Amino acid sequence: MALRIANHLSESHRVIVCTTAAPRPKYGNFQILNNLRARTDEDVKALNDVDVDIWLAMNAGYAAIAERLLKPVVAYFHGNDFLNPWVVSTPVLMKILSKMPLIGQFWYGKRRTYAQRKIGAGIQSLGCVLTNSLNTEAIIRQSYPQCPNVSLCTPGVEDRFFQTESDNDASSQIVNLLTVSRLQKATRRKNIDGVLRALARLKGHMEFAYSIVGHGDDMENLKSLSDSLGLSDRVTFHGRVDDDELLRLYRWANLFVLPAKSSPVDVEGFGIVYLEANASGVPVLCSAAGGALDAVVDGRTGIVLPGSEPGQIADGILRFVDARANFRKDDLREFARSFTWKIAAIRIEALILNSYDSFQRSSSEQSIGMNRVPSRAATPG
């Protein structure tokens, strides 16, 4: 997401991306600085050393340092970045206690609360807050009633996913199911184990093939679960795939399946993969959790489940089989076109410039040598 926004902004502005990750040799027409360490004091110094006019923070945690930065900040809130923050430094003793047996979970909760309060204190210094879904916006307003200027900016889907051809046989009795997701223990909200348990209930009632794209430290556990459920001949773990193979698998699929779970500290903020599937002419199966309802229209672009339990997932797949003919590929692609990255990035750019103008007006008595349109935009995190 940061890459798409930076690419768009760099068409009209000089963009600098500050990151904790080692950059690839070439991303786009912008500069990358590997200068962040997710340690508050160090990051404040590193960011203040960069010559910019305005910051776009791609992680809510950077709201905690907004007051200490020399230039205005617009922050994009996704959900888990403020429900369970990870770029806000906490006291050393609290960190040590959070890793100890027996008491660790209690102190981990204390660290989370501490970081959330730091974000809440910094929110007043933000130019505005951008967010990815109506659900996340509601959580922001509940968590931070003092938060000003929350603007909905849904993510976009890349043009390459708009495929008109299909590799599946619409008349086939076999239903091709696809999931694209990280397979990490930390993101078990994706609920792939729930899908596997649902398919175990269906294996005697319908023919299906299930492809799972993604990699992570939970992959072997999921493979073992698949084998124990007697699904090894119907489930394929593809791991990481290149772009061509990913597009082929979207063309192969009849139904995209990702019925995520939500908890008070772990939500699916939006779900770009739902739009990727629709752009390829594939309906989706999701649960009414997190921001999925911004990306999926029940009965039109997919099937929205009331929950995410295996029985509900199984019922949803059977519902799709019965209603399969109602999902027209052209209608799905047309829906996805209202979420292209060009549309999303233009809106984000406009809100950044509005925030910059507001800052300029409030600082009009100071001589800071800027043009109306900032020549240097930057994204920390």
Image (cartoon, rainbow, N blue to C red):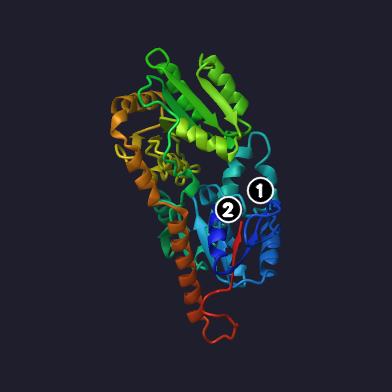
Residue displayed at 54% across by 36% down: 246
**Residue placed most toward the observer, 223 or 69:** 223
SS at badge 2 = helix
Residue at point 31% right, 38% down? 298
Amino acid on which disc 2 is placed = Tyr
Mark 2, residue position: 114
Task: Give the vertical position of 205 relative to 195 (above or below).
Answer: above
Contact (Cβ within 8 Å) of mark 1 with mark 2: yes
Q: Is residue 144 visible?
A: no
Return the residue nearer the eye: 304 or 169.
169
**Quadrant of the snapshot with the C terminus:** bottom right
In the shown orientation, is residue 101 left or right of residue 374? Answer: right
**Number of numbered discs on residues:** 2
Q: How far across and down, in percent of the image, does residue 204 sit? A: 40, 12
| Residue ID at (28%, 33%) | 326
**Looking at the picture, how far across and down is residue 346, in whole percent?**
45, 62
Element at label 1: helix
Q: Amino acid at mark 1?
A: Met
Mark 1 and mark 2 lie on one chain; the one further toward the N terminus is 1
Which residue is under mark 1?
94
